Amino acid sequence: MIEFTPEEDQFRASVSRFVDREVAPAASALDERGEFPRDLFHRAGELGYFGLRYPESVGGSGAAFVTYLILAEELGRGSMSLAAAVAMQAMMGTDFVFRYGTPEHHRRLLGPALRGEKVGAFCLSEPNAGSDLARIETTARETADGWRLRGHKMWVTNGTVADFFTVAASIDRTQGLKGLRFFLLERGAAGLTVGRKIATVGLRAGELTELAIEDCAGVPLGQAGVADLGRMLDQVRTMTGALAVGLGRAALDEAIRYAKDRVCFERPIAKFQAIRHMLAQAAVDLEASRLLVIQAGRRIERGVKCGRESAIAKLFASETANRIADTATRVLAGYGFAMEYPAQRFFRDARFLLIGGGTSELLRDVIAKDVIGE
Ligand SMILES: Cc1cc2nc3c(=O)[nH]c(=O)nc-3n(C[C@H](O)[C@H](O)[C@H](O)COP(=O)(O)OP(=O)(O)OC[C@H]3O[C@@H](n4cnc5c(N)ncnc54)[C@H](O)[C@@H]3O)c2cc1C
């Protein structure tokens, strides 16, 4: 079994109450309306969730990384649309501004973001660069008036409602990944156009969009580039694994509830071995997923190298969540195909877990390099 501290258990119980009372009951409607979950997002700010990873000096609570994973898991159990929006705001959307922003950025952007009053987004992917980030085409050029950016960003979570953007751009395209740096762009800046919401299969309240950046002024956030990117990707992958554990739990709970209730051939279907084994296998895989995610999270807390562990955790947990969502739709059969039941939403939302933070194929590549010792 996984050991959590009493504080972590207490935090989980409190998030779990929030999810049971306010998030899960709203999840279907959020998905159907496909609108940004503004009220719940503000509630997450009020509850201090956005500041978990940040010190008290900037309005956070200084919790360790596993506490943030617990948040991601519990929210992922309630609504993946909300969970992804909150996880983005609490980490990628604000991290670089916290680390490298000026006191003025902290006062004007970070503080309000941690209270849920402003929204931050993170922009790595482009129309021609997703897995292969060395192909990023957005460029940043230093001029007498400061840095100017040009390019196009894609799949920006929370993008349509974001107030500020952390944008990856190349300062030297001949250097591939080593040429990447991060820049702060603000909504309303001349040259920055925020696109329309992209219609998606899952995460329908997710406000995904694209950005057109046409000679736009940007403020550099740090110098590290590729090292910062590696640190961030380890955390994003581990966090996505935690979201997957949450979704897997919700799908398994729904399958168990239905299996106990549904009678076929004069028995609840939970008495049929075919169904029992599906549920048992899901429980085993879920437990293993959580172990892997927390193992990676503890390494991140200790500042230990974690590229392999985070890739393994994300790969296993996201594939597991998809299998369990599939299991739930099989157990519910016709009702798993009906929009009225949540199994279809788990099935659709789970697809995001296979992509965001690195596809399964890319992660297998990362793990293979480590295993082979390349
Ligand atoms: C819901 C959602 C939210 C997102 N949010 C954000 C965000 O906020 N910010 C952001 O920057 N990005 C975001 N993304 C983008 C996401 O990170 C990319 O979609 C992802 O990295 C994959 O890139 P791609 O879609 O361009 O696919 P590609 O990289 O073009 O991959 C296409 C196919 O080729 C395979 N492939 C690629 N490289 C290899 C390889 N080396 N070996 C084997 N197979 C390979 C892939 O696995 C895939 O099957 C989001 C995506 C989604 C779906």
Image (spheres, grey):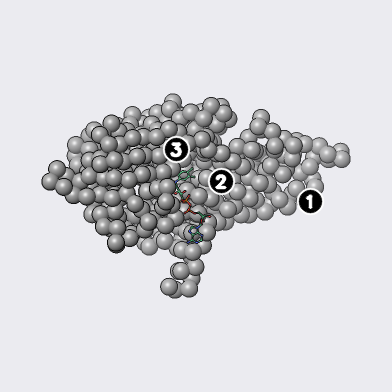
Mark count: 3
Q: Counting other residues with Cα less than 10 Å from the Cα at mark 3, is it few (<14), some (14-19), or many (20 or more)? A: many
Looking at numbered disc 1 in the image, what kind of residue is underneath it? Gln
Looking at numbered disc 3 in the image, what kind of residue is underneath it? Leu
In this rendered view, identify the residue nearer to me: 98 or 256: 98
Residue under label 3: 208
**Circles 2, 3 touching at the beta carbon (< 8 Å):** no
Choose the circle earlier in sequence order: 1 or 2: 1
Residue behind label 1 places its C-beta within 8 angstroms of ligand 1: no
Looking at numbered disc 2 in the image, what kind of residue is underneath it? Arg
Residue mark closest to the camera, 1 vs 2: 2
In this rendered view, identify the residue nearer to me: 238 or 147: 147
On the question of residue 66 being in view, the answer is no
In this rendered view, identify the residue nearer to me: 278 or 192: 192
On the question of residue 317 being in view, the answer is yes
Q: Position of residue 71 (x, y in %)?
A: 45, 41
Residue under label 2: 351
Q: Position of residue 58 (x, y in %)?
A: 26, 39
Identify the residue at horizontal 56%, vertical 41% (top origin): 349
Choose the circle earlier in sequence order: 3 or 1: 3
Q: CA–CA distance between discs 3 and 1?
A: 42 Å
Residue at the bottom extreme?
A: 373
Horizontal relation, residue 326 to residue 205: left or right:
right
Residue under label 1: 273
Identify the residue at horizontal 29%, vertical 58% (top origin): 173
Q: CA–CA distance between discs 2 and 3?
A: 15 Å
Residue behind label 3 places its C-beta within 8 angstroms of ligand 1: yes
Identify the residue at horizontal 36%, vertical 39% (top origin): 211
Q: Position of residue 128 (x, y in %)?
A: 42, 51
Identify the residue at horizontal 38%, vertical 31% (top origin): 161
Residue behind label 2 places its C-beta within 8 angstroms of ligand 1: yes
